[in-house]
Image (cartoon, rainbow, N blue to C red):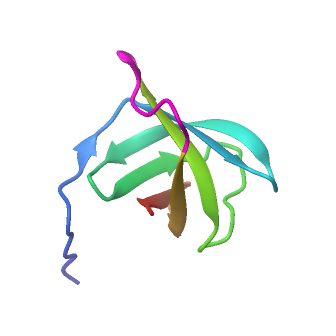
Amino acid sequence: MHEQRRYMRDTSQALVELSHPSFGMVELKARDLSDGGVFVMLGNHIAPPIGTVVKARIKRHTGIINQDPIDMQVVHHQSGGMGLMFV
C-alpha cells in the first residue's frame, strides 16, 4: 500500500505538552513533526480516543515554539504512539 502525505515529515527531538480534562497534562516525546501535525510517543500513557481535541505546546531545545496552547486532534494510534493534527 502506498501512503500519500500532504506534508513532509521531519524527525524531531521536540517535547509536546498535551492537556485535556480527561487526563490533565502530560509531556511526550515527538517522533516527527510536519506542517500538518506531530506524532508523539506515548510511553506508558494511554492514548485518548481518535477524534479527541487536546491542547498542545511544542518545545524544542531552543525554546517553546508556541507559547499559547493550540488545538490538536488525535487522528490515529500506531506503534506505541499517536498522530495529532493541527486543527
Q: Residue at x 23, y 44 (%)?
A: 10
Residue 8 magenta-drawn? no
Asked whether 2 or 14 is in front, the reply is 14
Answer with the quarter of the image where residue 13 lies.
Answer: top left
Q: Where is residue 70 in the image (x, y as percent from the top left)?
A: 51, 48
Image quadrant in which the N terminus is located: bottom left
In the displayed structure, does residue 49 sit left or right of residue 36? right
Q: Where is residue 34 in the image (x, y as percent from the top left)?
A: 27, 51
In the displayed structure, does residue 75 sit left or right of residue 1? right
Q: What stretch is highlighted in magenta?
A: 61-69
Q: Which residue is drawn at 80% across and 50% down?
A: 23
Q: How many marks?
A: 0
Asked whether 39 or 53 is in front, the reply is 53
Answer with the quarter of the image where residue 32 lies.
Answer: top left
Magenta-colored segment: predominant secondary structure = loop
Asked whether 84 or 79 is in front, the reply is 84
Residue extending farthest to the bottom is: 1
Residue 67 magenta-drawn? yes
Vertical arrangement, residue 67 with respect to residue 8, above or below:
above
Q: Where is residue 77 in the image (x, y as percent from the top left)?
A: 54, 66
